[in-house]
Amino acid sequence: MGIQKICCIGAGYVGGPTCSVIALKCPNICVTVVDRSQERIAQWNSEKLPIYEPGLDDVVKKCRGVNLFFSTDIHTGIQEADLIFISVNTPTKVFGNGKGRAADLKYVEGAARMIADIANSNKIVVEKSTVPVRAAESILNILRANNKPGVSYQILSNPEFLAEGTAIEDLLHADRVLIGGEDTPEGQLAIEELCKVYEHWIPRKNILTTNTWSSELSKLAANAFLAQRISSINSLSAVCEATGADVSEVARAVGLDSRIGSKFLQASIGFGGSCFQKDILNLVYICECLNLPEVANYWQQVIDMNEYQKSRFSNKIVESLFNTVSGKHIAILGFAFKKNTGDTRESPAIHVCKTLLIEGAILHIYDPKVEHDQIMADLTHPSVTEEPEVIRKTVHIYDNAYEAAKGAHALVVCTEWDEFMALDFHKIYQVMMKPAYIFDGRKILNHDALLKIGFHVQTIGKRIQRPIQARLWGSRVQT
Ligand code: NAD
Ligand code: UDX
């Protein structure tokens, strides 16, 4: 018969887009995405979806109410499904054993227990959440320990590789789909069923099947490799600033080697997002538990370098502004962890803002897609401040970059939104305090043009000359 009904537990950044694309490409399959958050489900059923993702609105509009449903009725969703994706969050543990490093599997366990309670027919249960190696074993233990007569389960690992901001494209044209399962006839049959779902749009040669543990580890490994490239180029950005080399030129020269490749070599203020740090910390923890301290230390360095990069950039702002930002107005352009998303999880902008707030700055923040409440929630979080009331008075959030720049001593680009490249910097220069500084944490602006206008410009991985005017006038102002 094949898979006719799919239920996805978790209507987040992964569950929502993934199931929308499955519904689009598999009109014969009924896909229900369930979540215990009523608010999130209501948003998925509204005109304004809970996440901003280019192309997502169109896909949801085409399928919603046809073969794609968003519901809080978890019971019916699970009961009717042939195949269930577990797509819940797996954040870093904040207490107990492995605090700050291990993945907290309480939501995955919760989902497994719900399935065990509710299911009364055979199910293929698919781990889509990113989990530590051998997590499938725990899920299976929960399911089998609560087995009802006549109900059997197959557990598959099918990690998701989409990146936010390009999720729909990534899902439609995935480099590969990875499916891990048990090396038994039943396991192989389950793998085959899931393959058939993806084969509606992914060529079979791009669907990779492995054993369960390889699949689980490959997801952590892929994120670790990607983040490692960013930390590597960011480490060299510091060398460039100290020597006069230009990190963009170095990245291009290095990346043109076909063995290395050009992607993920963009020096930045550090990587953010809900995955890289969490997954590498998880890998580090697993290595420690396996008594492999050298391996753990190796991957920990990727995180340490990222912290260094965020601090280095933040400190550079303070140092350049005559070593004090107390009482100074600083415009922050971009708060999301990357462009084309409204997600702020682990955004490096939070680190930059925190440093500036500790130093007494007044912040003017603008981001095209992040909700104002989200920015305030992030900056009043206990990990950022013990005085949320003070923050509410010193952080001002604006609806456009020009308003944010008014009266600012400096402008800091934290996210590489395309619209920032098209800003009228003559206009911005007029409304800023002088000397006017720009710190381009994403290397997206035309620095020569900014210098000509009169800005002092600093960026990542490149020494920049003083503004043209300042040089002509023999100014002693540092850049
Ligand atoms: P998310 O926080 O956006 O969504 C998770 C959803 O699960 C939430 O809406 C939550 O309410 C729901 N949930 C939790 N427990 C539940 C339960 N018992 N019943 C019903 N709903 C429940 O998380 P996300 O960003 O979608 O990530 C999900 C998983 O996918 C994580 O393991 C993450 O590491 C992995 N992943 C994320 C990305 C990404 O770009 N965000 C990419 C690849 C993989
Ligand atoms: C990442 C992985 O790319 C994806 O495969 C996985 O499924 C989830 O984690 P995501 O975090 O959504 O995706 O975005 P990504 O494009 O990887 O960017 C992560 C961070 O790295 C962002 O802060 C981004 O700005 C930064 N980055 C990326 C760089 O600093 N330089 C680069 O060259 C690339």
Image (tube, rainbow, N blue to C red):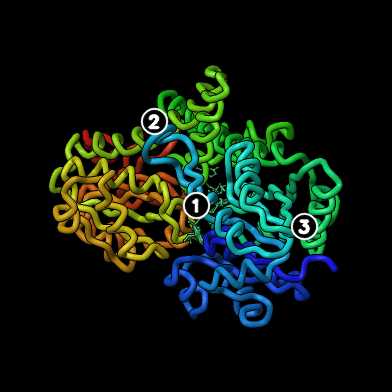
Give the spatial CA distance, label 3 vs label 1. Answer: 23 Å
Residue 51 % position (x, y): 49, 65
Q: Where does the image place residue 36, in percent across and percent down from the top left?
A: 47, 66
Q: Mark on residue 146?
A: none
Tell me the residue that label 2 is attached to: 308
Q: Quadrant of the C terminus?
A: top left
Quarter of the picture containing the N terminus is bottom right
Furthest residue to the front?
Answer: 149
Crowding at mark 2 (Cα within 10 Å: few <14, some 14-19, many 20+): some
Splitting the image into 4 quarters, where does residue 141 fall?
top right
In the image, residue 237 lies at what x, y percent? 47, 31
Q: Residue 257 falls in which quadrant of the image?
A: top right
On residue 194, which mark appears? 3
Helix, strand or loop for disc 2:
helix
Q: Residue at (37%, 54%) from the top-left corner?
A: 335
- Camera-side mark, 3 or 2: 3
Labelled pair 3, 2 in contact (Cβ < 8 Å): no
Residue 107: mark in rendering:
1
In this rendering, which labeled residue sits more in front, label 3 or label 1?
A: 1
The one nearer the camera, 49 or 91, is 91
Q: Nearer the viewer, residue 118 or 474?
A: 118
Measure the C-alpha gap from mark 2 to mark 1: 32 Å
